[in-house]
Amino acid sequence: MTPNGWGTGGRMCEALPMDIGVLGGTGPAGRGVATRLASIGHQVTLGSRDAGRAAGVVDELRARWGDRVAGLRPGDNEAAASATDLVVIATVWDAAVPTAEEYAGLLAGKTVIAMANGLHKQGRTFTPVLPPEGSLAQAVQAVAPEARVVAAFHLIPAAALGDLDHELGQDVLVVGDDDDARTTVLDLVDTIPGLRGLDAGPLANALGLEAFAAALLTVNLRHKGEGSLRVEGIGPRRTPPTAPTAGT
Amino acid sequence: MTPNGWGTGGRMCEALPMDIGVLGGTGPAGRGVATRLASIGHQVTLGSRDAGRAAGVVDELRARWGDRVAGLRPGDNEAAASATDLVVIATVWDAAVPTAEEYAGLLAGKTVIAMANGLHKQGRTFTPVLPPEGSLAQAVQAVAPEARVVAAFHLIPAAALGDLDHELGQDVLVVGDDDDARTTVLDLVDTIPGLRGLDAGPLANALGLEAFAAALLTVNLRHKGEGSLRVEGIGPRRTPPTAPTAGT
């Protein structure tokens, strides 16, 4: 438990280490999430369309962080999509859906994190770019229907995630239709020092997370500093009621 | 300036008191915002379709808060829409657009705050209900094209707004296409103790604010406590660059 009350939230971490793959791992978001997940003891395959480029990035990250990223290894996107426990789609936003479609077979049955925001920048303004499905996460789900898609990590700057000397202090809203997959990701977020996972419901709410990112990034452009999202006054997750809408 | 750093933000308040109207002032959101704005010295017309009902609610609020709401008076919605400085549309969400349309003539040229979220609740889940225009605020703008529509106050519980003994401590993202109107609302928010206005850009970003509300309300259902939004690490508004896209 960190002094600010964020942190592991008292949850158990017996499942560590997980075998995690990051698709599009050489970009800023991918490096950030791969580095941070490796730093808490997971086996992370940093994938890229170009395995050579992935190897170069992993060499760089090892040179910078040494043993702190001992679990990090390079691979192509196919190797990353073959990770057994969790796959993160961390490509640039407009590649998220085609990448999910390409590896849909390997993603079937797995917990898959979609972290992309569609963004249009003009001057001091970001506005959201959303697909016909509502959100990119829902579009990812549509092309990989057997994946258990969870959307998370929209509002954390990639640079902060990837800088292990930077102390995080943020809340991460997590949404997804599969209760087990969403819980897996909430628990994973809670094990990252400085982060706290908040259960924001079904994948339909990815729209709010993705579109809110444009608003928050605009605040960053128009105010001094860089914003981190916190939701104050919120306690631990409640135990779900038993089978609220079971049957039929 | 409150001890937590929220508050007036050092801004000047020479324009006080403003003449403010609240359409749909008898519902929870309307009572809340009317009470809070009256409490900081504004002249506030609490409007309703039924002026008698507005009078009853104002009597109630005066009985509860006495001189703290001295500037509060009842009226019909037409009287509220006739306020000279600012009109707040605080009806239930599905009445926001028809109400704006009905009073579009009176709203022309005025700063108009749209605070509605379209919400669908099922079990422990809220999801957003959005019109074809993208957000309710944009739909309000479409039916009242000469109003200077600003969206704000989405994420503050009505009960907290209306309870003057409840110390607020939240950030309020504010969006709108008219720079002066958006600045008016940002300044107004900054004068409410415990609130801070954050400039989140154009009205297109109302989509993110409205849809994020569904996600945050779902967090409230699934965690103990009640969440307040804060954006940490953010400082004062930057001075806008001179005429970034002027000309043509």
Image (cartoon, coloured by chain):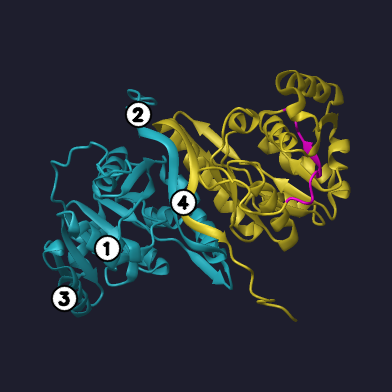
Chain colours: A yellow, B cyan
Answer with mark 4 or mark 3, whichever residue precedes in sequence: 3
Quarter occupied by the C terminus of chain A: bottom right
Answer with mark 2 or mark 4, whichever residue precedes in sequence: 4
Dot label at residue B59: 3
Residue type at numbered disc 2:
Arg
**Label 3, label 2: how many angstroms apart (C-alpha)?**
42 Å
**Label 1, label 3: how many angstroms apart (C-alpha)?**
25 Å
Q: Nearer the viewer, residue A189 or A5?
A: A5
**Label 2, label 4: how many angstroms apart (C-alpha)?**
21 Å
Residue where numbered disc 1 is placed? B103
Give the structural element (helix, strand or loop) at label 2.
loop
Give the structural element (helix, strand or loop) at label 3.
helix
The x, y position of residue B199, in whole percent, is: 38, 40
On the same chain, marks 1 and 4? The answer is yes
Q: In front: mark 1 or mark 4?
A: 4
Residue found at x 20% / y 64%: B80
Q: Main secondary structure of the magenta part?
A: loop
The chain under label 2 reads B
Q: In front: mark 1 or mark 3?
A: 3
Residue type at numbered disc 3:
Asp
Answer with mark 1 or mark 4, whichever residue precedes in sequence: 1
Dot label at residue B209: 4
Quadrant in the rendering for residue B49: bottom left
Residue where numbered disc 2 is placed? B238
Q: Nearer the viewer, residue B236 or B101?
A: B236
The x, y position of residue A30, in whole percent, is: 71, 33
Answer with mark 2 or mark 1, whichever residue precedes in sequence: 1
Residue found at x 37% / y 48%: B172
Q: Magenta residues, as a range? A: A13-26
Q: In front: mark 4 or mark 3?
A: 3
